[in-house]
Image: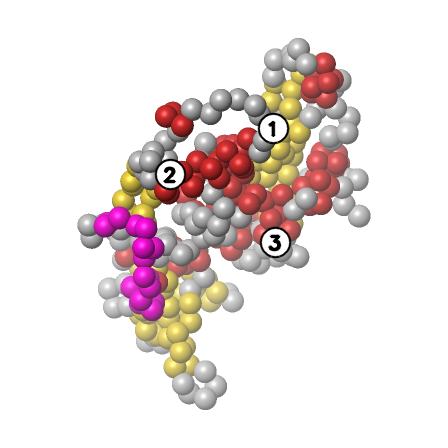
Amino acid sequence: MNDQVQWFFKEIDQTGKQFLQEYPDLINMHLENAHRGISGRSDVDFEASGVKYVIDLNTMKEYPVNDPTDTVEVIRREKLKDAETFNLPSKWDDNNDQNLKVITLLNNSQEFMDVEKMFKTSVFNGHFKVQFNASTFKVTKKQNSNRHKLIVVPNEAKTQTFIDKGIFISTNSRCCSDHLVGFNHMSHSVFAQSHTTSTAKTLFTGNNEDTAVLILDGTYIYIQKSSYHKFQKKTYSMHKNRPLVKPMIIVGSDGYILSVLGSYYANAHNNDASITKHLFKTNAEDIKQWIKDDDVLVVDRGFRESFP
């Protein structure tokens, strides 16, 4: 939603000139939900710097609760309609005036063969000497004019999306955020404002709306005993006395699952501390770019060796 619409309020600079100031992502989302009738309200209230404000969508005005006469104008803009005109890709079929159209590619089309070639190269990579039956390989493309040009999918997200959802995203492709998983599916500001409880804000952030509170903990997924001795040895847990793998779960203080990283082997080399070190060393899902300096990581003492 934030990719499609931006709400603004008119502000005045020191020279007396008016300019448009964007609302933060969370307020932007609440405004758009109210505008579309999803929330069932015609206004949105929020607090900034200790002052409570109301945005009235009937009058398109914002004002402080304690002074309804002190109003500023509110403006809604659809990003693509109000942005400069751009040309859709020449390979696209006619959308017939629809924003979204899903098309199945023909097996003998050049586009199909290009994707098939990239799929073989990326997934098999010459290591698997197996027959690949193209007749069972179906390729569809989604033409979404509203989200075109918005997201270039990073490599980590492409790999994880294929593993988790069976969706193959080719090199330099663009994808709507609904297909992405992990840290890539939600911005830092939206997570911090939407998935931090009031208790966590009071205890850890000093009520700073832009500070994210992340809770990290490893968990277990039990598996069958493998007949491959090397794998069996790495997945046998001396702690649980059975074979398992260990994903690292990262959630918000309200229980919202932001990401599941791994899985990792169950041997002694993969405790919570070493897994966390590996996540930051390899920058899994661009975690170092997503996490900000003032963010709070809540962990147990099993992580004590992972941080200096």
Front-most of 93 and 70?
A: 93
Question: What distance separates the C-alpha of mark 1 from that of mark 3?
Answer: 33 Å
Asked if residue 88 is among those painted magenta in the image, a careful observer would answer yes
Picture layout, residue 105 above or below residue 59: above
User: Residue at the spot x=29%, y=64% of the render?
Assistant: 81
Look at label 2 and name its amino acid: Phe
Which secondary structure dominates the residues rendered in magenta? loop
Q: Position of residue 94 (x, y in %)?
A: 23, 50
Which residues make up the magenta segment?
A: 80-95
Q: Which residue is mark 1?
A: 127
Q: Which kind of residue does numbered mark 3 sit on? A: Gln
Q: Are marks 2 and 1 in contact (CB under 8 Å)?
A: no
Dividing the picture into quadrants, the one containing residue 17 is bottom left
N-term-proximal mark, 1 vs 3: 1
Q: Residues within 10 Å of mark 1 (few under 14, many from 20)?
A: few
Q: Earlier in the sequence, mark 2 or mark 1?
A: 2
**The magenta stretch spans residue 54:** no
Q: Tag 2's secondary structure?
A: helix
Q: Is residue 261 left or right of residue 108?
A: right
- Residue shown at 37% from the left, 54% from the top: 148
